[in-house]
Structure formats: structure tokens, C-alpha cells
Amino acid sequence: MNPSTALARWLVDALVDRGVAHAVLCPGSRNAPLSFALAAHPGITLHSRIDERTAGFLALGIAKTSRRPVAVVTTSGTATANLHPAVLEAAHAGLTLVAVTADRPAALRGTGSNQTTDQVRLYGDAAAFADLSEPDPDALSAAWLPGGPIHLNVQLNDPLLPPAPRETSQIVAETSHIAAESSQMEPSPTDPGRRDQPGRSGEREESEQARTGRLARGPRTVVVAGDDSGNRARLLAESAGWPLLAEPSSGSRNGATPIRSYRLLLGTPLAARIERAVVLGHPTLSRPVSRLLAREDVEVVSVRARGRWPQRPFPVAAEYDAVEVTPGDESSGWLEEWQSADRDLSRRIDALVADQPDLTPYDVAAEVNAAVPPGGLLYVGASSPIRDLDLMARPYRVGERRLVVANRGLAGIDGTLSSALGAVIGRPHTTRAIAYVGDVTFLHDLTGLVVGPDEQRPDLTVVVANDDGGSIFATLEQGASGYADRYDKLFGTPHGVDLAALCGGLRVPHWRVTDRAELAHALASPNGGIEVVEAVVRRDNRRELDEAIRALAG
């Protein structure tokens, strides 16, 4: 066995021992030893993609729903740089994405050799790192910090191919001694958990002893549930009788305590009476929440977040690993005040949207939310779709939970279609899967729909709210009339793309709908496999519609 083949087989064995069950591979010459080793290993489900950025986000999506480490494997050179967006998202979201990058031998670095660049610590502080030139269990163990990206840079020299094709059983038998060596390494949990932060000595022992904060029920408190808060935010709000301000991808927007129209109510006198906020997950969705958490008269209690950089961007009075409510103090009616205001405002929002003559983005959000059945999966794109969903989505009942997920680590539009496909692959028991994105997000990750004929094609309905450009900017400062002469060139970026023709070229079924009834019908009749439902909405009145909805809160 040549050295590159031996190194590749050892590494794949070690990855499987540490919980990796899925790997996404991009074709290349330098990573050929890794490709053959992945294909031969019975413990790996292998997915192939032609675009490294797509591959990285596919792996990220699998990691997000499977809660296991997932590998993405590339050749050397610019291929490795294309993983950077997914690595950064994983770093902020606390996902164990294992970037395995093939490299030339160290002696060729800095020589101008073909497809050779400096790949050492390419992703900086975002990823733990190991530079492997031979099987090295100690180096792998040192780099294996679950709960964030891991970059394994693998130096591979010629020859790059195994001597001859052989049966999997024969290969496994030949490398059993290598597998035995790697199995002696300390195993990692399948849940990514939290990773230790480099440069913060002395905190590992403290983090291993979970600190629980005990809070009195008395102060007027709201629970802010950001991305990936989980069910603990709902349980806390219910036990204390506090309003729950839950983002769609929090995993806690169900039960009786979530306040659907919280974003608007935070601008009312009711919000001025808030004395304390308990923050879980990664809240990034709205400016009203950011302003609330920055208020000097609000005590902020943080439940420590996951991710490479878990520190909060706002002042925190106390931080714990978990919080619970102390006994006593009967309900003061605080939650009931929020619920009453929410019911009234939500009715007026629904009436205003229903009164519009054309299909609106808010209609699309409401229909998408209604179309996800219990046990289903909804993957939401950044920008307008997740904000529209935040306003229109009624909280689910506790016994009918759906999984709503999004790339909120950095909240970019990168790789959303790929992440959605990965999420369905990572959660095979999903009853129905829908991805809800804007047209710019759809076009940005079009290669995510390039799936080879022998690759797994999960059932996924992609709903595209198409307003021919970036409408979110119309609701921000740059959408004001004073910038109208430059708006489209700088922000609106109309593209005029025929999505039906694109889908035809990709051999993806396509529906085009222009009203709410058509949209509801399309969502109720999935064809199976990957399909696209294009919901055509206006962009020219987006600012006025947004202002009318905000005015309802008074």
C-alpha cells in the first residue's frame, strides 16, 4: 500500500470512529486517495457534488439536523477556499463540520507548484486545525473539538491511486490494524455540543460543571429565543408565566406562550415596562429585539450560546448554562397582557394582508407555514422570507411540532438550497420538507440543485418568493424616496431571470403561481423529489406595505 492510500484509509477509519456517517465529496486529483477510501468504507454514506461551496453547505445541512459530525472533502487550491462560507456559518452556529482538504507535500509549498497555496490554518480561528502528513492519532485528537468546524489538511504525495480495485471486505481486512490503532483514541459524542475556546485557559473545568441560575418570577420578564434555542426556552416561559419572543428557527415557537407579533409590540408602551430579558440561542433577526437587549433599564440574563464565539454583543448581567424559576410568586397577569395585545394585533395584520389585491410576501409566508405538517421540516432562507415568516407564522401546538431551521450563524444567503437538501438527508424520518427562500437566495445557490443521476434526491419543495430583486432593502433606510435614483443599481438588483427556463434546464419540476389559492393548491400537491414553486409577488409596493403593517401597532 502506498503512503497516500494508507494515510487516507487511516483518516477515514478515524472519522467513522468519531461519529462521521456522511461525507460530501468534490472531484479532484489530489484528493483521489481520500475519494477511494471514502467509497470503500461501509460506514460512510457518500454524496458527490461538483461545486465545493455547494458541498460545504450540503454537509452543514446534514450536520444541522442529524446532530452528528459531517465531513466535506476537497482537492487543493481554490477548492479549499470555497468551503470558507460554510466553515464560518458552522463556527457561529456550533456545528461540527469537518473540512478535509487535500494538499501537496509541505516541501512544495511556496514553490508555485500547480494548485498549491498556503492551506495551513486557512480558516483562521474559525476552525480547529491539524496538518497531517502521516497517520497521527495525537494530532487528530488535539484538533477534534466538537461543536465547531475542524480543518484537517492532508498532505498527499504521488502515487495517488491504490494499486488496483479490490473488494471492500478485502480493503477493510488489510487495514484492520490501522483501524485498531485509531479506535484507541478517545471517542467524541455524536451531539456536537460546545467546543472549548482556544486561548481561554482555566475555563474548561468551569464549563464542565454546569452553572444553573435561579430567577425570581417577580420582575416583568420576557424570554428571547434566538436560533437553535430548543425546547428549553418554551419550558422556561411556561413555568414562569413569561411572554416568549421566539424566532422561527428557535425550536421553541410552540405552545401557549409565544407572542407572534412580538417584533411590532416591542415598539409599544407594553414593551417599555419590561424589566428583564432571559436570552437563549442566537437572536439576530430583528432590530427591536437588539434595541431591547441594549436598554440600560433591562437586566439581561444569558443562557450560554453554542458556537465558536458565544459571547453576547450586548451587556449581560449574568450568564449561566441553564436557568430555572424559583418557587412562589403567583402570576401577575403579565403574560396575559402580552397575549391579549398579540391576539388583537395579529387579527389586524391578517385582515390587512387579506385585503391586498395581489399576492404578497406575507401571504407566501402564511401559506408555507400552514403547509408544513406535524413532523415536517421547514428550511427558511435569510433576508425577507424568515422575517415575513416571523410575523405571519402562528405558533404550533406542543404535540404537533415541526422543525424550522435556518442558517442564522451568520445569516447569509449562501448555500441555502444545499443546506436544505442536506437537512432532509440528515433527518430521513421527515414527513414533508419545504425550503422557503427569496429569488436572490435561489439564484445564489442554483448549483445546489445540480444533483447527479446516481445521487440521493430527497423530497423537497422549494418555494421561491420572486419579486425580481432584493426587496428587503426597500424596508430599510436605503429604500427611502431620497435614494430612488440609485436604489435598483445598488440594492434592488433586478435580474429578470426566467425561473421556469432555469428549472427546465435542471430537470426540476416548476410551478408558477400568482395568487394565494394557486399557492395553497401547489403546496398541497407535492410531486415528490425536488420541485420548485415560484410565487410571483410585487416589489414596488413593499415599503408601503411594510409601513402599513407597522402602523397597526400604533
Image (cartoon, rainbow, N blue to C red):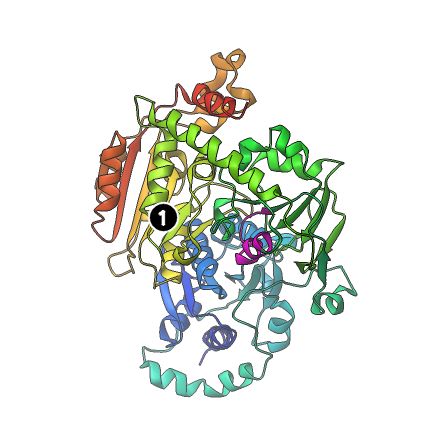
Task: Name which residue type carries label 1.
Answer: Gly
Mark count: 1
Does 448 appear above or below 519? Answer: below
- Percent across and percent down for residue 85 are 52, 47
Quadrant of the frame with the N terminus: bottom left
Q: Residue sitting at 55 percent across and 72 percent down?
A: 189
- Dot 1 falls on a residue whose secondary structure is helix
How many residues crowd around disc 1 within 10 Å: few (fewer than 14), some, or many (20 or more)? Answer: many
Q: Is residue 325 visible?
A: yes
- Percent across and percent down for residue 421 are 36, 53
Q: Residue sitting at 47 percent across and 58 percent down?
A: 64
Q: Residue sitting at 69 percent across and 51 percent down?
A: 217
Q: Which residues are magenta?
A: 224-238
233 lies left or right of 199: left
Residue 471, picture quadrant: top left
Can residue 233 be found in the magenta stretch?
yes
Can residue 393 be found in the magenta stretch?
no
Q: Which residue is the site of mark 1?
A: 448
- Percent across and percent down for residue 77 are 50, 53
Foreground: 52 or 194? 194
Q: Is residue 446 visible?
A: no
267 lies left or right of 177: right
- Percent across and percent down for residue 442 are 37, 39
Residue 368, picture quadrant: top left
Foreground: 155 or 171? 171
Foreground: 402 or 7? 402
Does 418 appear above or below 195? Answer: above
Q: Residue sitting at 43 percent across and 59 percent down?
A: 62
